[in-house]
Amino acid sequence: MLQQLPGILFSGGRIAIITFHSLEDRIVKSFFKEGGAEKNESDAVYGTKIKSELLVITKKPITPGEEELKNNPRARSAKLSIAERI
């Protein structure tokens, strides 16, 4: 699903993903930071980075508050990450 995001979202469109495991969170975070752009070796000049098509809105993932954890203990590992297509 992550690979299809840049083609699905219009410019200015936002995507919000909830992860429940640290490995999932790492995959989403790295994709938002680096994987939004198609990486072709012929497009990249040596020593330059290809810019991502996604702008990370949340610097750190949003986690549930104390009230939410009281009402829903399963939410303790949930993290929300948001990005916008530029």
Image (tube, rainbow, N blue to C red):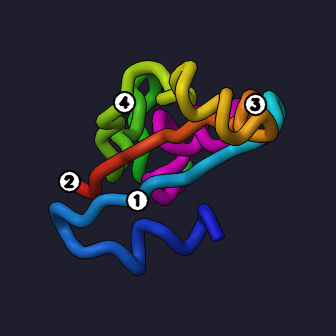
Residue 24 image-quadrant placement: top right
Task: Compare marks 4 and 1 and give the one earlier in the sequence.
Answer: 1
Residue 37 lies, in percent from the top left, at: 44, 53
Neighbor class of circle 1 (other Cα within 10 Å; few <14, some 14-19, many 20+) is some
Please report the residue visible at 48 percent of the width from the left and 29 percent of the height from the top: 62
Amino acid type, callout 1: Ile
Residue 45 lies, in percent from the top left, at: 39, 35
The reply to whether residue 15 is visible in this rendering is yes
Disc number placed over residue 77 in the picture, else none: 3
Mark 3 and mark 2 in contact (Cβ < 8 Å)?
no
Q: Nearer the viewer, mark 2 or mark 1?
A: 1
Task: Compare marks 2 and 4 and give the one earlier in the sequence.
Answer: 4
Task: Compare marks 3 and 4 and give the one earlier in the sequence.
Answer: 4
Report the Cα–Cα distance between label 2 and label 4: 15 Å
Front residue of this view, candidates 37 and 67: 67
Task: Compare marks 2 and 1 and give the one earlier in the sequence.
Answer: 1
Instruction: Left or right? Give the position of 23 relative to 47.
Output: right
Disc number placed over residue 86 in the picture, else none: 2
Residue ID for mark 1: 15
Q: Secondary structure at mark 2?
A: loop
Report the Cα–Cα distance between label 1 and label 3: 20 Å
Disc number placed over residue 58 in the picture, else none: 4
Mark 1 and mark 2 in contact (Cβ < 8 Å)?
no
Q: Which residues are magenta?
A: 24-40
Residue 47 lies, in percent from the top left, at: 44, 20
Task: Compare marks 2 and 3 and give the one earlier in the sequence.
Answer: 3
Amino acid type, callout 2: Ile
Q: Secondary structure at mark 4?
A: loop
Task: Compare marks 1 and 3 and give the one earlier in the sequence.
Answer: 1
